[in-house]
Amino acid sequence: MSCFSFLKTMMFIFNGIIFLGGTAVLGIGIWVKVDGGSFVKILGSAAPQLMQVVNVGYLCIAVGAFLMVMGFLGCCGAVKESRCMLMLFFIIILIIFIAEIAGAVVVLAFSSLSNIFLEYLGTVAAKYLREDYGKANDLTAVWNTTMKEFKCCGFHGPEDFSNSTYYQQNKEYPPVCCSNHSPCTQRNTTTKGCLKAFEHFLSQNGKIVGGVALGICGLELAAMIVALVLFCKIGDK
């Protein structure tokens, strides 16, 4: 097998897996939105700890569709030897790669900018928790899952729920903020905010997170190189 055929085969297999994965994620997202009741029953019996994320169907649909498009471009570009598809695949991966590198540079080199971003994010999160938590089902489910997994309450702390719409309606804090205490009052809540919990998680698992990030960047770089090599080889024919 020539080098060109080997690269075509690897490109097809790799993107075929991405396409099938995207199809599965898209199917789950559509299932959740169309027939959420049966999905809840199956998920509840198989993995009760994931029950709170069944309302993120739109996210699954978006991610699944994106993965399907990327897999399709990679597979068809390699099999049909389409320079246009390969270049489009390369450009999309390149944009994602540059965005990741830019984000890493901002976090590592410009701590003042990252602090400004965190301050802005905290303002937005506190406003949401105060006004919309408990009403917007999708985002409420995401926050519940985050607070449960990180054993935290609110973005800065339980005070984010003080005088919130949720507290005024229920006269208590979200149950996920308390462990085995009912009703959930401020005295029983987890005092740690999710920002501190996430910072602690990064400090404890920074090497793992960094390794995963480097692995993803490596795969993206390899995909771009293969796509570019195939693009050039096809042009030389």
Image (cartoon, rainbow, N blue to C red):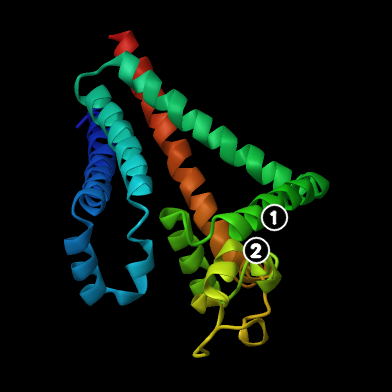
Q: Report the amino acid beneath label 1.
A: Gly
Which residue is depicted at the point 65% across and 63% down?
A: 155
* 96 relative to 15 in the view: left or right: right
**Outermost right residue:** 112
Q: Nearer the viewer, residue 141 or 169?
A: 169
Which residue is depicted at the point 23% across and 46% down?
A: 30
Which part of the image, by quadrant, shows the N terminus? top left
- Looking at the image, residue 102 lies above or below residue 24: above
Residue carrying label 1: 122
Which residue is depicted at the point 35% across and 69% down?
A: 50
Residue 3 visible, this orientation = no
Q: How many marks?
A: 2
The reply to whether the C-beta atoms of the residues labelled 2 and 1 are less than 8 Å apart is: yes
Residue 161, percent from left and from top: 64, 68
Residue carrying label 2: 155
Decide: few, some or many residues near mark 1? Use Cα within 10 Å; few <14, some 14-19, many ≥20: some
Q: Report the amino acid beneath label 2.
A: Phe
Q: Nearer the viewer, residue 51 or 24?
A: 51
Separation of marks 2 and 1 at Cα, in angstroms? 7 Å
* 70 relative to 202 in the view: left or right: left
Residue 176, percent from left and from top: 50, 76
Q: Nearer the viewer, residue 103 or 3?
A: 103
Which part of the image, by quadrant, shows the C terminus? top left
Of the numbered discs 2 and 1, the one sitting upstream in the chain is: 1
